[in-house]
Amino acid sequence: MKKIFLITTCLFIFLGCSKNNNTNFTVVPKQTKSKDLNKSTGTDSLLINDSVKNAKKIAINSDVSCAYSKSYSSPYPSSYYTVISRFPVAGASSVIIPKGSWQAGIYAFNNQDDGNLVVYVKNTGKVLWASGTNNKVTRLDAQNDLNLVLYQVNGPPVFESQTYYYKCGSKNPRNTMLVLTNDGDLSIIADGMATFGPVTVTLATTRTFGGVVSPNNGTFFKLYTTSGGTGGVNFVY
């Protein structure tokens, strides 16, 4: 089964996760997958450049931080992915993801002992995506604010997914999970509802579908809108 990603024009927005207040925002082309459910030409989608490491999450007004996914597909069957971690409900303790590897189809994800997060082809060892955080002592947390954060044991965070934008007040999207799909994507997914019925929504992805080397190595790709409308899919809480 193939996922479906929607492509829209993105606006610059003053959101970031860096000590530098002059963080640049760039539009990154979305990997297109076949049989798109919808094509939106709206200009309300927001793409965050999260290429800056040693990041600190900015404070967001929890009353207005709700977002709609612009990337969704038909509901994924459980056979399509391997669950690496489930995100906790709002207010619950973070889930620590252990060191080790997970496999889905011919692909694998490894939370390595050297601190690097790597998506690769299992049999050949071909690296498709990496966090670039090797040579560090780290702990990987799936947090109750929906952020996936790689902490140094004795230092600042060195990687984060920045998916806290999808949190709505005190609510988290239902069944938010970090998964590796049989098509090679390391993704954070959740339940959503389109006008035509239930869907699987994507909060972030490495864009390694089909064994493609990621164009956003070291970061997660996110595509969302805060205003809903055409192409915006509601989360299920």
Image (spheres, grey):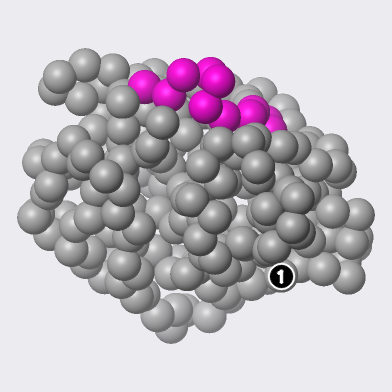
Q: Is residue 78 left or right of residue 103?
A: left
Residue in the picture at 74% in, 57% down: 124
Residue in the picture at 70% in, 45% down: 108
Q: Is residue 148 left or right of residue 24?
A: right
Q: Is residue 60 visible to us here?
A: no
**Which residue is under mark 1?**
132
Number of marks present in the image shown: 1
Location of residue 21 in the rendering, given as x and y in whole percent from the top left corner:
47, 79
Q: Is residue 18 left or right of residue 4?
A: right
Location of residue 168 in the rendering, given as x and y in whole percent from the top left corner:
38, 33
Q: Is residue 63 left or right of residue 18?
A: left
Location of residue 201 in the rendering, given as x and y in whole percent from the top left corner:
36, 33
Residue in the picture at 54% in, 55% down: 211
- Magenta segment range? 75-85
Residue 82 is a magenta residue: yes
Residue 205 is a magenta residue: no
Q: Amino acid at mark 1?
A: Gly
